[in-house]
């Protein structure tokens, strides 16, 4: 079973054996049969353990006691503790998925979750960058860092660390720290430090050019890039494979990274990974998020994440006239409803421009 948090593990261990085994079997089904990611399995397990713990507190002694009233009272209890509508909708979906599986497996006499309604999740419009803001962000690693003034003492102040290590006032990602401490030769350290902006540039270019998820870009191997057709092969949620095109600026960034950047960082732990951390291993999504946020702050943009670049790419595609179905394919959405939120973003931006510019707005 995927490792949930300590509180969930304690509740899992306190469940009656039959219920505990049901949780483990359902987690194995999600992972091996449905090919769900570790994070998805963990979320389902957390919700299910909470539900079954609630059922036990209501007097259920085995799985057959689980009925619609238990499911509804569990959701009601979640609501009274302040759970958001999005969280309630997800937990209801987890309960329905478990109920359907348990019925098919013969553990429940009926699919009691089929009649469980859930609150309609409120979807806030994502914040997107303007095209000029996105361009400033992806080009930030190519700009030379401003030269700091000469320090008054022999020891340079901490905030004057080179931009290639970490943008000013932003804590360096954990993988970038070895530039100052790793036992490399001075020449090797300089080469590695020069490689980091090239890595950061290709990371930002790919995120914005393709709209892929941060986990997907970090999971790319060198062989997943088709330079001739300018396409990357991405494995998304549920292991679904798709091909996503990228443009000329991203191609230039890739060429520079593969020719001058990656060889400086490659090591025994690199394997076929396209993007590498400072220690030579595959770039971690957490570090990638820190890199995006640091460069956004450095160029004076609002707080931005890789998912913000994904939102921006989708919105700019639609504003440029791209077909909604094509954008759905590019983003790897299983449902068109997930993509349609970007049409609302474009309409809101149009309304804002209208209110600002039209004399009779």
Image (cartoon, rainbow, N blue to C red):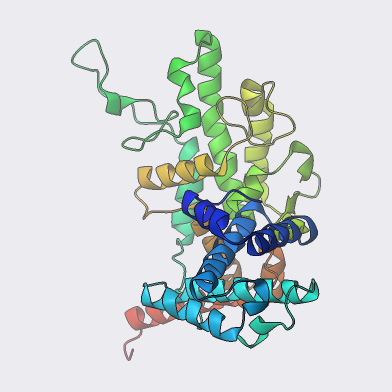
Residue name at image x 73 percent, y 72 percent: 102
Residue name at image x 35 percent, y 85 percent: 358
Q: Tell me: 130 left or right of 102.
A: left
Position of residue 350 measured from the top left corner of the image (x, y, whole percent): 45, 79
Q: Tell me: 318 left or right of 273.
A: left
Q: Tell me: 172 left or right of 67.
A: left
Q: Quarter of the image containing the C terminus? A: bottom left
Position of residue 309 measured from the top left corner of the image (x, y, whole percent): 52, 56
Residue nearest the viewer, comparing 27 with 259: 27
Position of residue 29 measured from the top left corner of the image (x, y, whole percent): 75, 60
Position of residue 14 measured from the top left corner of the image (x, y, whole percent): 54, 57
Outermost residue toward the left in this view: 152
The quarter holding residue 337 reads bottom right
The quarter holding residue 35 reads bottom right
Residue name at image x 49 percent, y 58 percent: 308
Numbered marks: total: 0
Vertical order, 80 against 232 (above or below): below
Residue name at image x 73 percent, y 29 percent: 271
Q: Tell me: 154 left or right of 54.
A: left
Q: Is residue 118 visible?
A: no
Q: Is residue 136 visible?
A: yes
């Amino acid at each position: 079973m995927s490792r949930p948090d300590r509180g969930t593990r304690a509740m899992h261990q306190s469940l009656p054996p039959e219920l505990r085994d049901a949780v483990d079997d359902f987690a194995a089904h999600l992972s091996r049969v449905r090919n769900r990611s570790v994070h998805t399995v963990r979320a389902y397990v957390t919700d299910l353990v909470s539900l079954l713990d609630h059922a036990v507190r209501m007097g259920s002694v085995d799985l057959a006691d689980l009925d619609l009233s238990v499911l509804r009272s569990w959701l009601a209890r979640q609501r009274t503790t302040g759970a958001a509508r999005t969280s309630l909708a997800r937990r209801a979906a987890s309960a329905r998925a478990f109920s359907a599986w348990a019925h098919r497996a013969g553990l429940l006499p009926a699919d009691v979750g089929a009649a469980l309604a859930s609150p309609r999740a409120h979807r806030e419009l994502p914040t997107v960058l303007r095209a000029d803001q996105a361009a400033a962000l992806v080009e930030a690693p190519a700009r030379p860092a401003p030269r700091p003034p000469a320090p008054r003492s022999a020891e340079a102040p901490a905030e004057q660390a080179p931009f290639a290590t970490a943008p000013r006032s932003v804590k360096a990602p954990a993988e970038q720290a070895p530039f100052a401490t790793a036992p490399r030769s001075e020449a090797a350290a300089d080469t590695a430090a020069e490689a980091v902006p090239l890595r950061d540039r290709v990371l930002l270019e790919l995120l914005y050019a393709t709209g892929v998820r941060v986990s997907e870009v970090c999971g790319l191997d060198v062989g997943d890039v088709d330079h001739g057709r300018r396409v990357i092969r991405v494995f998304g949620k549920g292991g679904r494979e798709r091909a996503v095109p990228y443009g000329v600026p991203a191609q230039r960034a890739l060429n520079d990274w593969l020719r001058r950047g990656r060889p400086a960082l490659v090591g025994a732990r690199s394997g076929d990974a396209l993007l590498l951390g400072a220690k030579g291993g595959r770039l971690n999504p957490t570090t990638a998020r820190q890199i995006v946020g640091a460069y956004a702050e450095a160029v004076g943009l609002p707080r931005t994440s890789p998912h913000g670049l994904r939102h921006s790419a989708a919105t700019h595609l639609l504003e440029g006239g791209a077909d909604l179905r094509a954008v759905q394919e590019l983003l790897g959405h299983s449902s068109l409803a997930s993509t349609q939120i970007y049409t609302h973003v474009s309409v809101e931006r149009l309304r804002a421009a209208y209110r600002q510019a039209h004399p009779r707005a």
